């Protein structure tokens, strides 16, 4: 009752702590923040110069004494101190004197996170000013945010393609019956594009250019209409700036290997799924969430490879954070039925 009363006066929030982006949901207000998971630091003074979008603009463009880093890699915290400072920055930005009370916070984590990594996430949020911290696994949060009937006695398959990891889960009766993860996702797609043009065109391009090409003309399905765009980079032979016209076919070819790995983990999960739940998937199919779900033609590719219905969730990039938000809205009733478990593990 005391926590419920405090909740009325604090800006409780859900955080999707992603490799590529951080999204924050505030109870009663919805999604209030979406920023890249990037921090710019002065190496000489250890001072944080920028966080989020301002820091992302500095990637690859900083002088020697400034470094722009991503403190999360492959879906897990690689730099605990910088992550803590980033979380603190975002909490203060959202919370900023709108309440005298520290917020309760729900943070999503990859299902493959170890207990050590989960504890590190909790401690980072606590030191950043949280009153209480709860952890929810990303596939479950994504499924809840996509409004899948996770509590029904039937199989639901979700594929969460994030920045650092892709997670595949089969959910039934409020629990994850099966889950597999692979460290191939949006960042790897960008890197594959960079390597492709380095090898094929002797052109060195940056992460931002690769991401822009992926978003504007990228597709992984053969029958997609081809588009073209110009990209700028540095000629590997002459060292001079260079402009090259690229096409959708180039992007599809560059992403062929990551797509093979992605298809393999999905097919492996389908092969491990119990027969009764497999039967449910024939009708319900596969639901895609995460930023990678927006990659052109990915639903058609999966539909052809699995022979199952494939659906892209509404606002796939928001599904995980919306799942944390729905947990926040129902936290008190959920805690009554799960008093012995602080984590949201169905």
Image (cartoon, rainbow, N blue to C red):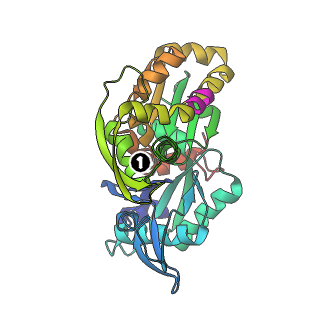
**Residue 316: percent from the left, percent from the top?**
39, 39
Q: Name which quarter of the figure residue 326 lies in.
A: top left
Residue appearing at x 63%, y 63% in the figure: 120
Q: Where is residue 342 drawn, in percent x and y?
A: 61, 53
Span colored in magenta: 260-265
- Residue 230 point in image, percent of width and height: 30, 45
Please check the rendered image and state whether residue 262 is part of the magenta-colored stretch, yes or no: yes
Observer able to see residue 239: yes
Q: Quadrant of residue 271?
A: top right
Spot occupied by residue 209 in the image (x, y as percentages of width and height): 38, 51
Give the answer, above or below, for where 258 lies relative to 223. Answer: below
The magenta stretch spans residue 103: no
**Given the current orientation, which residue lies at the most extreme front position?**
238
Task: Say which of 100 and 290 sits in front.
Answer: 290
Q: Which residue, as the protein is rendered here, is positioned at the far bottom?
A: 45
Q: Is residue 270 left or right of residue 320?
A: right
The residue at 37%/62% (across/down) is 8
- Whether residue 174 is visible to the viewer of this picture, yes or no, is no
* Mark 1 crowd level (few <14, some 14–19, many ≥20, 10 Å Cα): many
Residue 33 as seen in the image, left or right of residue 16: left
Q: Secondary structure at mark 1?
A: helix
Rendered residue at 48%/67% (across/down): 87
Most prominent secondary structure in the magenta stretch? helix
Number of disc labels: 1
Image side of residue 274 versus residue 101, left or right: right
Query: In the depicted view, which residue is nearer to us: 184 or 172?
Result: 184
Q: Quadrant of the C terminus?
A: top right
x 66%, y 58%: residue: 117
Position of residue 126 relative to residue 170, above or below, is: below
- Say which residue label 1 marks: 210
* In-image side of 278 versus 190 (left or right): right
């Amino acid at each position: 009752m005391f926590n419920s009363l405090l909740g009325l006066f604090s800006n409780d929030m859900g955080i999707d702590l992603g490799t590529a982006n951080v999204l924050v949901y505030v109870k009663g207000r919805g999604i209030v923040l979406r920023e890249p998971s990037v921090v710019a630091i002065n190496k000489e003074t250890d001072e944080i110069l920028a966080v989020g979008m301002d820091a992302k603009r500095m990637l690859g463009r900083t002088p020697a004494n400034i470094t722009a880093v991503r403190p999360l890699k492959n879906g897990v915290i690689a730099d605990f101190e910088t992550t803590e400072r980033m979380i603190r920055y975002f909490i203060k930005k959202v919370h900023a004197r709108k309440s005298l009370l520290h917020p309760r916070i729900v943070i999503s984590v990859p299902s493959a996170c170890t207990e050590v990594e989960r504890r590190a996430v909790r401690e980072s949020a606590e030191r950043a000013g949280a009153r209480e911290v709860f952890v929810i696994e990303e596939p479950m949060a994504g499924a809840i945010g996509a409004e899948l009937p996770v509590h029904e006695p039937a199989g639901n398959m979700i594929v969460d393609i994030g920045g650092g990891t892709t997670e595949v889960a089969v959910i039934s009766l409020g629990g994850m019956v099966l889950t597999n993860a692979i460290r191939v996702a949006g960042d790897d797609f960008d890197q594959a594009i960079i390597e492709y043009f380095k090898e094929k065109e002797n052109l060195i391009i940056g992460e931002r250019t690769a991401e822009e090409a992926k978003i504007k003309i990228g597709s992984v399905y053969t029958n997609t209409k081809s588009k073209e765009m110009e990209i700028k980079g540095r000629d590997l032979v002459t060292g001079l700036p260079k402009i090259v016209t690229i096409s959708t076919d180039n992007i599809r070819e560059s992403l062929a290997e990551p797509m093979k790995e992605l298809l393999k983990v999905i097919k492996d999960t389908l092969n491990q799924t119990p027969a009764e739940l497999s039967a449910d998937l024939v009708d319900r199919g596969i639901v895609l969430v995460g930023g990678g779900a927006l990659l052109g033609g990915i639903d058609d590719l999966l539909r052809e490879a699995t022979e199952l219905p494939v659906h892209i969730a509404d606002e796939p990039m928001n599904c995980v954070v919306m799942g944390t938000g729905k947990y926040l809205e129902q936290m008190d009733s959920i805690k009554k039925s799960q008093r012995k478990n602080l984590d949201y593990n169905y």
